[in-house]
Image (cartoon, rainbow, N blue to C red):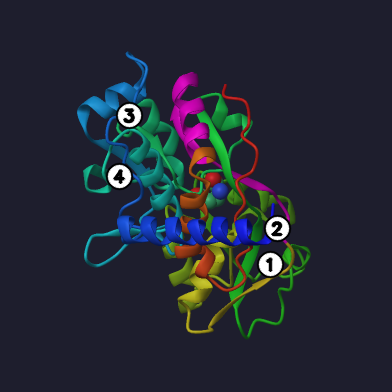
Amino acid sequence: MGHSRKLVVAGLAVAALTLSACGSGSTDAPKVAAKPSLEAGTTMAKISAAGKMKVGTKFDQPGFGLKGLDGKLTGFDVEVAKIIGGAMGIDAANIEWVESPSKLREELIEKGNVDLVAATYTINDKRKKRITFAGPYYVAGQQLMVKTDNTKIKGPADLKANPDQKVCSVTGSTPAEQVKPYLANPGQLVLFDVYDKCANALRTGQVQVVTTDNVILLGFVSKSDKKFKLVGEQFTKEPYGIGIKKGDVKFCEFINKTLKDNSAAYLKAWADTAGKVEGAAPAALPPAAPCV
Ligand code: GLU
């Protein structure tokens, strides 16, 4: 390609970006398909015809799913759900958000209380027995968070030698299970239903450690006024999936294709939310896993 042609192409790309930025305004409004062509009888066609969608997400996790005092949801999971809804012609205003604590996610999907769950939801075999996962759309890793002045805990290997250091996590989460081999005794683990209760317990000194995915913890660090820090390496892999009804392969494939086709919106969603938090690695859409 000649130099001048390259410049023209680059110029067009900038113009297109500017136009689309003007068109979409903010992350509140990802692309909404005017007349999506969806196979009759599929979940996508049903959601599209209903003109609304129910999404299960977290309400207490900065950067991923956080309900503001104005009632608005913000975060990467929220934006990813909006991209998926947009491909079915669903405007963000027509998404009903349903709080989905870790332990309740499979049940909410099975009962049909939500059309999908986007909630820092690790894909694993145990959960795949009850639901189907689209994705992964991000890969996090489990880590530890302590108060900035904590010098005892530098990583999971220090937990056994310090049984007085209580570790908080959430019921029904993968980190609550995966931390167990590192503990001195079962009583060292304190479980709540949501992570902001763990963060509060850390603040008040009821627990000394919080463990879950690094990117969730980074969100709490960013809101802690430098009172919290992450320690140690990531010691697990947590690939995030979109939870849907078990066996809905067509919906799963549709979600995977939608995320792949909307890579610019996906990257923008990350940059506008969890990507803003210091220490968060850039997002790159991982290859989709088979839909089963
Ligand atoms: N990704 C982990 C899980 O799905 C931890 C985060 C969470 O509890 O949502 O269990």
Residue 135, image x and y in percent? 56, 37
Residue 271, image x and y in percent? 50, 63
Disc 1 under 8 Å from ligand 1? The reply is: no
Q: CA–CA distance between discs 3 and 4?
A: 25 Å
For label 4, the residue is: 98
Q: CA–CA distance between discs 3 and 1?
A: 56 Å
Tell me which corner region of the image, top left, top right, bottom left or bottom right, holds residue 69: bottom left
CB under 8 Å between callouts 4 and 2? no
Q: CA–CA distance between discs 2 and 1?
A: 7 Å
Q: Is residue 253 magenta?
A: yes
For the residue carrying disc 2, how many other residues have a C-alpha within 10 Å: few (<14), some (14-19), or many (20+)? many
Q: Is residue 102 visible?
A: yes
CB under 8 Å between callouts 2 and 1? yes
Q: Which SS class for mark 3?
A: loop
Disc 3 under 8 Å from ligand 1? The reply is: no
Q: CA–CA distance between discs 1 and 4?
A: 37 Å
Q: CA–CA distance between discs 4 and 2?
A: 34 Å
**Which comes before the other along the chain, label 3 or label 4?**
3
Stretch of the chain drawn in magenta = 234-259
Please name whichever residue, 39 or 149, is drawn nearer the observer in this view of the structure.
39
Between marks 3 and 1 in the image, the one whose residue lies nearer the viewer = 3
